[in-house]
Image (spheres, rainbow, N blue to C red):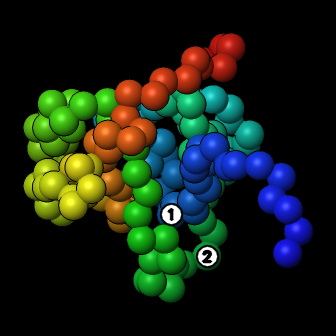
Amino acid sequence: MPNRPGRLNGLRHVAILVPNLEACERFYVDVLGMQVLNRANEDLVYLTCGNDNLSLGRAFAPSSGVQVVDHYGFVVDSLDELHAWYAYFKECGVTLLDRPFAHGDGAHSFHLLDPAGNKIQPIYHPAISGQRFSAPQGV
């Protein structure tokens, strides 16, 4: 087996197709607080929290109804912040799938749905929470 060139630096980019691009963009920007990084065209927008990249593309074909990606997560910096996000989402009327719960490894999380039905997991994990990267210029 060839030598691995180095260690990956975590999952920083996710690209999803959504049937309702405008509603999903509003959700990620207005509810989650992400920023538009780049609008490539009317069917593709890139969003960021400052250290990541979420690509939302307009889906032109109907979904098979089977979600290929189970979920993706947004890291929060503390357990208190996780609970604050839960209360915020509840107040916003976001579809919550469960309540904050403890994992066996010290992590805590819960799950919610975006307007396209994608499952999102806000997660506090002691091994990665609190690590902040500076935002790219212009963001």
Q: Where's the N terminus, which quadrant?
A: bottom right
Q: Point out the tag, 2 or 1, that comes first from the N-terminus.
A: 1
Image location (x, y in percent) of residue 8: 67, 49
How many marks on residues?
A: 2
Image location (x, y in percent) of residue 116: 40, 61
Residue 74 image-quadrant placement? top left
Badge 1 is on which residue?
A: 19
Q: Is residue 79 visible?
A: yes
Image location (x, y in percent) of residue 80: 15, 30
Amino acid type, mark 2:
Ala
Image location (x, y in percent) of residue 77: 32, 30
At 74% from the left and 40% from the top, the residue drawn is: 40
Q: Can residue 75 be seen in this view?
A: no
At 42% from the left and 71% from the top, the residue drawn is: 70
Distance from the alpha carbon under mark 2 to that under mark 1: 8 Å
**Above/below status of 81 relative to 114:** above
Amino acid type, mark 1:
Pro
At 16% from the left and 55% from the top, the residue drawn is: 102
Q: Does dot 2 land on a helix, a strand or a loop?
A: loop
**Above/below status of 115 relative to 13:** below
